[in-house]
Image: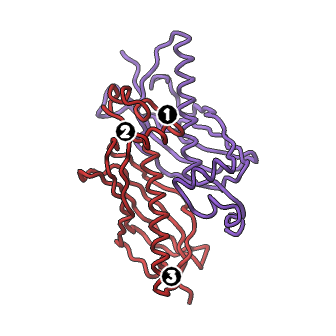
Chain colours: A red, B purple
Amino acid sequence: MKFFEDIRVGDADDIGHHTFLAEDIKSFAQRFDPQPFHVDDEAAARSHFGALCASGWHTAVVWMRLMVDHRRRAIEEQQARGEPVAAFGPALGFRDLKWLKPVYVGDTIAYRSEVVELRPSGSRPRWGLLTIRSTGTNQKGDLVISFVSTTLVERRPE
Amino acid sequence: MKFFEDIRVGDADDIGHHTFLAEDIKSFAQRFDPQPFHVDDEAAARSHFGALCASGWHTAVVWMRLMVDHRRRAIEEQQARGEPVAAFGPALGFRDLKWLKPVYVGDTIAYRSEVVELRPSGSRPRWGLLTIRSTGTNQKGDLVISFVSTTLVERRPE
């Protein structure tokens, strides 16, 4: 992770991509979102979605997984270059999460995060508040998910 | 599900509760949020959380699962009484999701949803927009998660 002072509004990262397979979609939904259009091909065909599609929560948590892997790679690269690595806190929450289009079997979603706001923390001088907008886009270029999240990032030591 | 016209702002439902066990927390996080404090007891003890705790996304998707089961029970009860059942659409998204406290091993989270806004849909005369605030509270009475979501609910046929 970069230090707060080394991040700029507009900085964007490709976080990774994921292809949603039928077994994947069904096993997530059986555990967490067992609505017919997420677990049963025939019921999905009769629904307003027209075919089996992923739970919106599934589309969101795949972003989380890719983001953890992305950060890990970035930290390893910094360490390999002998650079200091900034600490970061857990996400404090999310706002404006929108599921804009269904994610169907075989869709490949590319996730991207862009810095939209940077603000020093008023109460915690060691930290800055990093706000990013994250999106997922399918192979046809349609936006399927979008949300905004804020994380604490370490400031560069004086 | 009730029809739009039969729902009032302030109506509240206990959705269900869930006890987060260590195996549960780790298996979710290994797949979707493999940060050390969600998958490894010793690393969690050394982290700012002080002990193993659930991914915030896990706390959120357990609400989804309990909500699906809760709606299913409500629909079965309506059908048993011979009442008509309103259709409802998928969630369009959510806003203001906050993770307010960690969820530790053994914590039991009680989920509750309260109607905060009702608005007829401008573009879809068959539907109304139902906005609820959902919360999860642990066994000590601490709020651990809160978010607001909007769903389409069928209007009572004329």
CA gap between label 2 and label 1 equals 12 Å
In the drawing, what numbered circle is on residue A79? 3
Label 3: how many residues lie within 10 Å, few (<14), some (14-19) or many (20+)?
A: few
Who comes first in sequence, dot 3 or dot 2? 2
Residues A106 and A46: in front is A106
Q: Amino acid at mark 2?
A: Cys
Q: Residue furthest top?
A: B82
Q: Residue furthest front?
A: A23
Residues B30 and B156: in front is B30
**What residue sits 48% from the left and 57% below the top?**
A64
**Could you tell me residue A35's position as x and y percent?**
46, 32
In the drawing, what numbered circle is on residue A53? 2
Q: Which residue is mark 1?
A: A34
Chain letter of disc 1 in the image: A
Q: What secondary structure is marked by label 3?
A: helix
> Is there one chain holding both mark 2 and mark 1?
yes
Residues B114 and B144: in front is B144
Chain letter of disc 2 in the image: A
> Is there one chain holding both mark 1 and mark 3?
yes
CA gap between label 1 and label 3 equals 43 Å
Chain letter of disc 3 in the image: A
Q: Amino acid at mark 3?
A: Gln
Q: What secondary structure is marked by label 2?
A: loop
> Is there one chain holding both mark 3 and mark 2?
yes
**What residue sits 34% from the left and 53% below the top?**
A109
